[in-house]
Amino acid sequence: MQNYNYPNELGFFGDHGGLYVSETLIAALTELKQAYAEAKADPSFWAQYHSDLKYYVGRPSPVYHAERLSRYLGGAQIYLKREDLNHSGAHKINNTIGQALLAKRMGKKRVIAETGAGQHGVASATVAARFGMDCTVYMGTEDIQRQAPNVYRMKLLGAQVVGVDSGSKTLKDAMNEAMREWVARVDDTFYIIGTAAGPMPYPAMVRDFQCVIGNEAKIQMPELIGRQPDVAVACVGGGSNAIGLFYPYINEMSTRLVGVEAGGHGLNGHEHAAPITSGSPMGVLHGFRSYLMQDEHGQVSSTHSVSAGLDYPGVGPEHSFLHDIGRVDYTAVGDEAALEAFHLLCHQEGIIPALESSHAVAWAVANAPKMGKDEVILVNLSGRGDKDINTVAKLDGITL
């Protein structure tokens, strides 16, 4: 893997990625690609980025040994990369800080974003307030209902939240509407995409901002255990938290990488959000080509996950490529197992995880007992679960 150097100049990771957008967006994306290339080569840009991560976000996020959980399960030792401790409660702010700094550099006064679980919307609203920008967040009305606390947080931070009532009323549809508005306002508006997907240069740019996760972990794990983990695992929707952990580990061949998609109610039919694991064909969505859930007519399928942030029919193109070359093992965890892992982490460690992160925790819960006590699993705990308590309470038959 020493020659891993992706994407190529056209934005492709193998057969995945690229630029599939209307002509009206080509100029905006060309401008963005050039601006990011210049920023990436500018040490002062990264100095400001890392300063904000340290003094505003609170990085580095710690790695925590979940000793009680590990002892309860038996087998491998489980460590958690605590992205839930970041300001705003998730990994999302690593990316929004970077994109907001780029928007300022480009002279944009306004940002827009899409959101599913609401964490990217909150992170976008947070950095917009931090840098004095107007912010509009698009969110499916289904997600507005199940993520009400985050909707209010966005409004408290000064953002306008626009409900999207088309399609499945979830993340896919929110992204559709955000891209439609960007077409109409490219001159003054910067679109902060929240995941490692979308048209070039977004997948690589978001990855670069999220790599702080894996870069920190590669320093922290030897300090804690004297070596790198045997397994590094993260949940995968679009896939930004996962690629942020995985990318710095690609050449660490002794560390197995595991991406966990949303298995929903099972991989038969479309009551899931697991395009890689279910063997979905390639298709084009939101400006890029990747594995995509589709019906027999090639239309984008509806999806389901208990986790709003994983409820997306596509997956970032780099994840599709890493699957193709066999560097990352992708699997799926269903709603029931994710909810069980959610409660188990609460009870064993006093940590309330996001439902997205609970899918990765569930993989560790299922696999740690099969491994030796001297083996180590590193779980990217991508966010905290405050936003999900209404969803979990409703499933538990409790009215808050």
Image: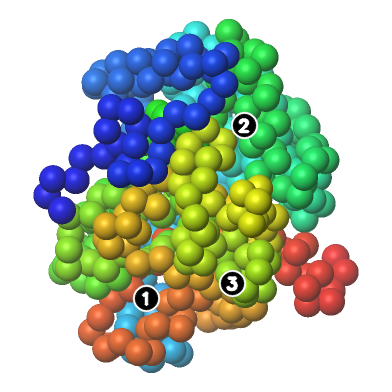
Distance between mark 2 and mark 1 Cα atoms: 34 Å
Q: Earlier in the sequence, mark 2 or mark 1?
A: 1
| Residue corresponding to mark 1 | 78
Mark 3 or mark 2, whichever is nearer to me: 3
Q: What element does badge 1 sit on?
A: strand
Instruction: Farthest residue to the right: give it.
Output: 399
Amino acid of disc 3: Leu
| Labels 3 and 1 touching (C-beta < 8 A) | no
Residue at 28% across / 76% down in the picture? 376
Instruction: Farthest residue to the left: give it.
Output: 2
Instruction: Say the numbered circle drawn on residue 113.
Output: 2
* Dot 3 alpha-carbon crowd within 10 angstroms: few under 14, some 14 to 19, many 20 or more: some
| Residue corresponding to mark 3 | 267
Distance between mark 3 and mark 2 Cα atoms: 30 Å
* Residue 252, quarter of picture: bottom left
- Where residue 79 appears, x then y in whole percent? 36, 70
Residue at 51% across / 67% down in the picture? 278
Q: Quadrant of the C terminus?
A: bottom right
Amino acid of disc 2: Ala
- Where residue 363 appears, x then y in whole percent? 46, 75
